[in-house]
Image: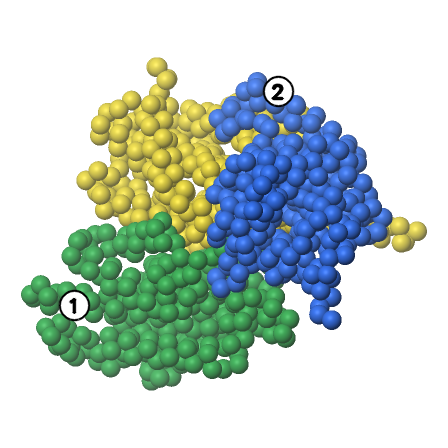
Chain colours: A green, B yellow, C blue
Amino acid sequence: MEQHEQILQYLISGLTIGAIYALVALGFNIIHNATGIVNFVQCEFVTLGGMMMYTFYTLLRFPIPLSFFLSTATVTLLGALIERGPIRMAKSKAIIILVFITIGLSSVIRGTALLTWGPDNVPVPPFSGEVVIRMFGAAILPQHLWIFGITIAVVILLRYFFHRTLIGKAMRATAFNRRAASLVGISTNRMILLSFAMSGGLGAIGGMIIAPVTTTSYDTGIMLALKGFAAAILGGYGNSTGAIVGGLILGVLESLGAGLISSKFKNAFAFLILLLVLFFKPTGLLGHGETDRV
Amino acid sequence: MEKQTGYKEVNSIVIQFMSFFIRKKENLFLLLFALAIILIPLGVKNKYYILVMNVVGLNTIVVVGLNLLIGFAGQISLGHAAFYGMGAYLSAVLTTTYHLPPWPTILIAMIATGTVAYFVGYPSLKLKGHYLVMATLGFSIIVNILMVELDKITGGPSGFPGIPPLSIGKLVFDNDFKNFYLIWTFVFFSILLSFNLVHSRVGRALRAIHGSEIAANTLGVDTDKYKTKVFVLSAMFASLAGSLYAHYITFISPRSFDFYYSIQVVTMVIVGGMGSIWGSFFGAGLLTLLSEILHVAEKYNIIAYGAILTLVLVFFPEGVGAGLYSVWQRWKIKTLTKESSNK
Amino acid sequence: MNPIERNPKEFILRGDHVSKTFGGVLALHDVSLGIKGNEITAIIGPNGAGKTTLLNLITGIYPPTSGKVLFQGEGISELKPFQIAFRGITRTFQNLQLFQNMTILENVMVGLHTRTQSEFLSCLAYLPKVRREEKIVKEEGHSILRFLNLERKADWLSSSLSYGEQRRLEIARALAGNPKLMLLDEPVAGLSGKETEEMAELILKIKENGVTIMLVEHDMNFVMGVSDKIIVLNYGQKISEGTPSEVQRDPTVIKAYLGEG
């Protein structure tokens, strides 16, 4: 393959994985904005997206739309249960404690996944076949189109939700200023519950659309989710456009780095970028500055 | 910042618990501790038990240092596996491949690790708390990848064998019992140094940063400098433990220094009770033992560890020790009021 | 030339044309003021007038957008809060920023940070000089608590004090550093009538000990009774200054508080 065709290939795979990072970053932002928590269960949401898809589509042979729906629904429900259960019941509301509760829960879910599906990779077939499409010398799989398409659809739906529906605006209000939001009658508890549920759904979708393209097993979500966190920071903590931009840029940079510089350090690139952002522009590409008021 | 320091109401139980251990009693406990260190290998003959205790000791050194950062200064790091691993690999490579003398190498490793910690910590600590979490997380993953991929130096995923044991003159620390004394002497001094620090001007400044960073600042505490220094100090503790680990087991591999270890040591700090030095020892001991026990049932390891961590954090966020203590207090009050109402 | 520029040396603290914007909000606009040494100066004004912003600016929590702050003739606008503490300015907080994880005595001992020197390495090693310093710090801490009538509860957790006592503790802590200038942010907010009187006596006692005091308050009786000079802010600008009786009669002040007509 010629140089520019190769670069195009890297771009495509970068954008593909970047879309997943973007979805995770959006989920990360939703919970972080509402509660200040870094939700490590996100790792498992992504994993479970893929694993549920395997269960419903590969094992139970349900049609794709139904499998998609059921997978998303179960993980969304899980997100809600986590908030309603351990998070709500926690005696201490301190951020560090809640973050570590999510780390503990993450292990519980991962351990359960290991017991349920075993340690090996599981196959999730692509949604509509494997016929390669050639465009300008680069190979695009139909699954790539699904990934882009579904991601765009999700982003549009989220935009609509947050800016046009009452609940969405209520969530934004809670994220902006919790006390003010509760003073105008918004049930902040419900908003937080919703944020966990949505984060679950987003993570799951991310996990299931990439599943046919990469390996899927009980712990594949971890790297994906952690890089998603990095993307959220790259784009600007709490900024939803930033999450998308950050995700895509991170995916592309990682792909180009692995292809052009060294594939051995592929996983390191994302975190190297994270460190560089934190040190040189901590507010991220699109973030605003934060001032401490007494 | 208010969110970061929000658990102070919960930590007050730990402080009340701890206030029983004022200076004089502290010295008594340290004495008993030293005595236990001397006597245990004479009584316990099972090599496996000694091995486990040695691992507890190594973890305690890391946890005590980490507690200074988390429990006292109130900052979270998810990157201490990297510092632990740097100590191990630096000692391993410099003494085995380059034949440098081991004791000075331990010091070199501590200084190198501390320097790296400075460059990671200083920019992160100037910002809000969650930046340090993500920065240390990213750093930890990068270091682990380097350990695996720079295989010509580190031996790669299959590990680095053949590390020489430590020795003082003719005394070579080449078995579990000798290493017990070596490691636990260092544990003793780590705890002693921590006590000294905590009950001093610097310790108060650190705790003030945890209590209210802005007030600490207005009282003359250079919070950025102090947070960075305690971060570097905690990294150096971890590096020391890593070096000792390398010379003890004589074989190291990247798997011991991954992201999960970072999480394990912070868990030990929290379960033991943030801000409690003896709690660090207790947390390290409890969770290391737990790991060992669960090791047998590998498949159930992850889920059990996670479940215990979650349950402790949900119901005893102030740490298991303090948590059980307050449960006992409440039970006492209940039985006392029942008695008086029965009269 | 305004009176401050005419006699700059009289003023221990000076603000020269200080402005502060937050995003689009102009919190302080071209405020020039002077605080005389050994006096009690009160900053009053309706809510949102910029009083706390002014305090935060002086203590270095953020820098002014334009203008300078000078303390004893030297510019401090670019200094960080901890550096300003070493220059001799301390403060209390409107919403109480006690160290709830520490005892009362320890809270005060942190206040002594600027008067002590032990650093990391010496503290780790518990050197003799550290031991000596600790003894002195403890004694000094106790004597400050005695001055504020809190010594009895020295080893209590600061969170177990009553509200009035907590306010006193914050003052004790700010006083411990032997400041030349103390800034009090709403020192009597939420206090009962009796507690307010006691606070007024305390502040007068502190002034007698040579400390200059600048305070922000809403309680007019308290302010009128305790201040040597009053500065009035409204919408981020200085609209009046003078003795309590002068300010009380100033029509611009009356209008600001009561509205037009």
Q: CA distance from mark 1 to mark 2?
A: 70 Å
Q: For the residue marked with disc 2, what is the amino acid?
A: Arg
Q: Position of residue C43 (x, y in %)?
A: 67, 51
User: Is residue B194 visible in this depiction of the protein?
Assistant: yes
**Horizontal and vertical percent for residue A147?**
29, 75
Q: Residue at x 31, y 74 (%)?
A: A209
* Chain for disc number 2: C
- Kindly identify the residue that appears in the image at 21 percent across and 52 percent down: A264
Element type at mark 2: helix
Q: Looking at the picture, does residue C210 appear above or below residue B80?
A: above
> Dot 1: what SS?
helix
* Towards the viewer: C183 or B205: C183
Query: Crowding near pointer 1: few (<14 within 10 Å), some, many (20+)?
Result: many
Q: Chain of mark 1?
A: A
Point 28% across, 43% down: residue: B147
Which residue is more in the foreground, C111 or C247? C247
Residue C215 image point, x, y percent: 68, 47
Residue in the image at 54% along x and 47% along y: C16
At label 2, counting other C-alpha atoms closer than 10 Å, the crowd grade (few under 14, some 14-19, many 20 or more) is few
Residue at which label 1 appears: A9
Rendered image: mark on residue C132: 2
Residue closest to the eye, B33 or C37: C37
